[in-house]
Amino acid sequence: MKTRQIFIVDDDDSVRLSLVQLLSILPDHQVHSFASGDVFLAAAARLDPGCLLLDLHMPGTPGIGVLEAIGPIAERFATIVLTGESDVGTAVQAMKLGAFDFLEKPCDHVRLIAAIESAFSRQAKSIQAVTRRAQALAKINSLSLRERDVLIGLIEGHSNKVIAHDLGISPRTIEIYRAKLMEKLHVRSLSEALGIAFAAGLYSND
């Protein structure tokens, strides 16, 4: 199993040390700590993907500011925000910015570890979805404009004859474009082609 990375960002030395001691005993997990949001942000671009435990209230850049700053690479960090009882509204704002979960301080250790495991699981699924979409987009982008028009016609459930009429070309030409797009998408069936189109976010023109 690949070592999982956990990043703790909290300006409270005692909280940070306590979390490091607790989480360092987890097998196949490596724990890193940062005393401020600014210190974390300075290193974020070089860090491997992992779970981020993020305090909301810190001097300098607060937790919300950290989430806003890492926006372009946010999918690399499965973020759990740590908040006080009166900060639920801010925690909800953090989740709108991509945080996976929030926990009130002081954190129950069992619940914290369960939240971390859940965040890692959801992150893995998210990364897989992003990868599938990127692969599908690459295939769709390999199509010519006319091949894409034909594919959209197929997405709309139209026959070759109807697509030919809409595009002002012959049904035989549609068959040629259809064969070419299937070849470029590396599929043998229409259902596979549609699956790639939907994964890439390609829908009808309606």
Image (tube, rainbow, N blue to C red):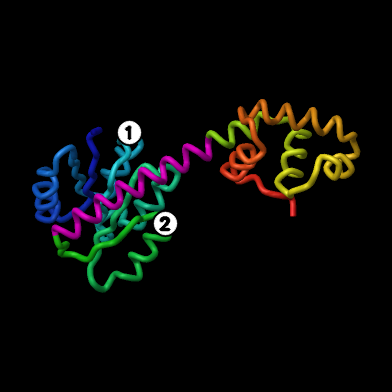
Q: Is residue 77 magenta?
A: no
Mark 1: give few (<14), some (14-19) or many (20+) Cα within 10 Å. Answer: few
Query: Mark 1 falls on what kind of element?
Result: loop
Quarter containing the C terminus: bottom right
Picture residue at 70% right of the left edge, 30% below the top: 181
Q: Report the side of 85 relative to 180 (left or right).
A: left
Q: Which residue is mark 2?
A: 97
Q: Give the amino acid at mark 2.
A: Leu
Mark seen at residue 31: none
Q: Nearer the viewer, residue 100 or 43?
A: 100
Q: Which residue is mark 1?
A: 46
Write the start and end of the magenta stretch as one range: 109-134
The image position of residue 160, as x and y in percent, is: 82, 40
Q: Nearer the viewer, residue 39 or 94?
A: 94
The image position of residue 166, as x and y in percent, is: 87, 44
Q: Give the amino acid at mark 1.
A: Arg
Picture residue at 18% right of the left edge, 64% below the top: 105
Picture residue at 32% right of the left edge, 47% below the top: 121
> Residue 73 occupies which quadrant of the picture?
top left
* Magenta span dominant secondary structure: helix
Q: Report the side of 28 relative to 93 (left or right).
A: left
Q: Report the side of 148 relative to 43 (left or right).
A: right
